[in-house]
Amino acid sequence: MKRAVVTGGAGFLGSHLCERLIAEGIGVACVDNLITGKRENIAHLEGRADFEFLLHDVSRPIEIPGPVDYVLHFASPASPIDYLELPIQTLKVGSLGTHNSLGLAKAKRARYLLASTSEVYGDPLVHPQPESYWGNVNPVGPRGVYDEAKRFAEAMTMAYHRVHGLETRIVRIFNTYGPRMRPRDGRVVPAFIQQALAGEPLTVFGDGGQTRSFCYVDDLIEGIYRLLLSAESQPVNIGNPHEMTILEFAERIRALIGSPSPIERRPLPEDDPKTRQPDITRARALLGWEPRVPLETGLARTIEYFRNLAATSRAGGQP
Ligand code: NAD
Ligand code: UDP
């Protein structure tokens, strides 16, 4: 049986990834310090012979006994609220954590996959964003801690590939949503859903004219799994090119939930990218991949998850 190490495996994306690897017959060692993740996300996997959980900060050296075939580095605060609250941890996990996980992959002769981000493009001046675009990032702004950590992580990954001949993959993930996001992680999808369900105002930042393109988690995981098995060492965008303004998105959520919530304007956070849309030409050509889940379907599943979570929390369970 092949074996994968997933850093950040108790987070939103990491937990879906662990599940998928296990479904493919790959054993998983999930390494997480639970700084933004939750043990509940992987509770259904614990106790299986092909799954183990290790509570560990990957910004410190990682020791995993036994053979390892894949290392997938997903550990990092990912929501703007989280990385603004945890700027130094974010820089450390993107730099030291990437170095340590690359070192683990090298020692085990494992294939390495880095979870990078559309944030490497910053506030983009090219639209949509192809992988060949080098980006427009403010290194000293509040988002710089995340963007620059990920840019460093990409550079370090390519250096291990070039110098040590390590098999590496880099996925640039665009806004992804789905079950297991934290209701209050501040990202727009859980924020609007939770506000609409509670009948609270939907907090639109700025004039709401900024755009994003939302990918359902199952589509993303499929793209990442295909990339892992591919021979492509250059970065590949994975995301949904269906772009909309944040104001349009707020209207969609209100309509889907049938909520009377008003829209409330809040100041636009500093350096908030004005547009974002993946160019997925490379993913289509190299991986035969494109998203399949329509926004309405993905949102319906996500709303259902948040409804159940609210009901559990009202009944006195873990929120
Ligand atoms: P998340 O916060 O739910 O998951 C991150 C996980 O990493 C958490 O379980 C957290 O506890 C863990 N972690 C953080 N620092 C750690 C450390 N030092 N040691 C061990 N574990 C640590 O976020 P997510 O949305 O699942 O994001 C996962 C990865 O995907 C991140 O690397 C993020 O940058 C990347 N990404 C996500 C998106 C998205 O839309 N969700 C977009 C672009 C990139
Ligand atoms: N946003 C918003 N209201 C919120 C949360 C976010 O209007 O309560 C906006 C935010 O300013 C950004 C977009 O929604 O333009 C997406 O934000 P998110 O935090 O989900 O991720 P980002 O794409 O900025 O990393």
Image (cartoon, grey):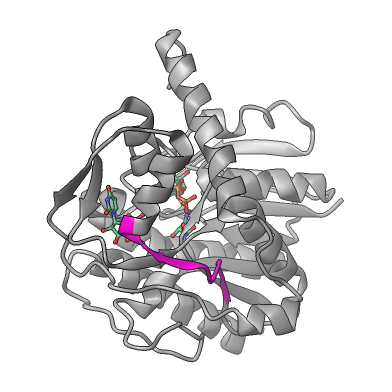
Q: Judge left or right: residue 170 versus residue 37.
A: right
Pick out the residue farthest to the left: 267
- Quadrant containing the C terminus is top left
Task: Look at the picture and state if 234 lies above or below 269.
Answer: below
Q: Position of residue 265 (x, y in %)?
A: 16, 50
Assess whether residue 245 is covered by the magenta stretch: yes
Which is more toward the observer, 200 or 22? Answer: 200
Q: Quarter containing ligand 2?
A: bottom left
* Residue 196 as seen in the image, left or right of residue 40: left
The residue sitting at 61% across, 27% down in the picture is 43
Is residue 35 shown to the viewer in this render?
Answer: no
**Residue 220 figure quarter:** bottom right
Q: Is residue 134 left or right of residue 104?
A: left
Residue at 56% of width from left, 40% of height from top? 300
Give the residue furthest to the top.
Answer: 315
Residue 141 to residue 70: above or below: below
At which x and y percent is residue 139? Answer: 22, 77
Was residue 286 drawn as part of the magenta stretch in this picture? no
Dividing the picture into quadrants, the one containing residue 287 is bottom right
Q: 99 or 90: nearer the eye?
A: 90
Q: Residue at x 33, y 26 (%)?
A: 198
Between 63 and 255, the one lying in front of the other is 255
Measured from the top left, where is residue 40 in percent x and y? 54, 28
Q: Which residues are magenta?
A: 237-247
Q: Residue at x 35, y 68 (%)?
A: 211
